Image: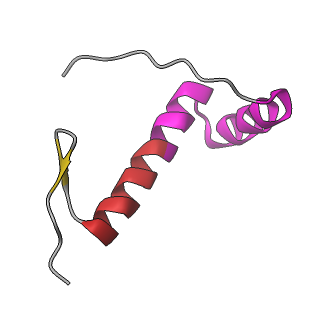
Amino acid sequence: MAIKSLSIRIDEIMLDKLHVVADYEGRSANSQILILIRDCIEGYEAKHGTIFGGQQERKEP
């Protein structure tokens, strides 16, 4: 799996708060963001079905 780079614009106060949370968890800000993204995707997939390569498999109701 290739590692891609993503640039984001973030408010300075929010970034400072992110660093506090990441430091508390013993992580870098980058690692903390990856965990937040992973948790978001897992929550989405639990509700809507697995995403495969940008395509979503429908979850039966």
Near-viewer residue (15 or 54): 54
**Residue 28 visible here:** no
Identify the colour scheme used.
secondary structure
Among the 4 quarters of the image, the one containing residue 2? top left
Among the 4 quarters of the image, the one containing residue 29? top right
**Quadrant occupied by the C terminus:** bottom left
**Relative to residue 12, is residue 28 drawn left or right?**
left
Residue at x 46% of width, y 36% of height: 34
Among the 4 quarters of the image, the one containing residue 59? bottom left
Near-viewer residue (10 or 24): 10
- Check the image and name the residue furthest to the right: 13
Q: Is residue 21 magenta?
A: yes
Residue 44: x %, y % from top left: 37, 61
**Relative to residue 26, is residue 36 drawn left or right?**
left
Residue 16: x %, y % from top left: 81, 31
Residue at x 35% of width, y 57% of height: 42
Q: Is residue 12 magenta?
A: yes
**Relative to residue 28, is residue 53 drawn left or right?**
left
Residue 20: x %, y % from top left: 77, 37
Residue at x 16% of width, y 66% of height: 58
Near-viewer residue (12 or 21): 12
Residue 46: x %, y % from top left: 30, 68
User: Magenta residues, as a range?
Assistant: 11-36
The secondary structure making up most of the magenta span is helix
**Relative to residue 60, is residue 9 drawn left or right?**
right
- Check the image and name the residue furthest to the bottom: 61
Labels in figure, total: 0
**Residue 9 visible here:** yes
**Quadrant occupied by the N terminus:** top left
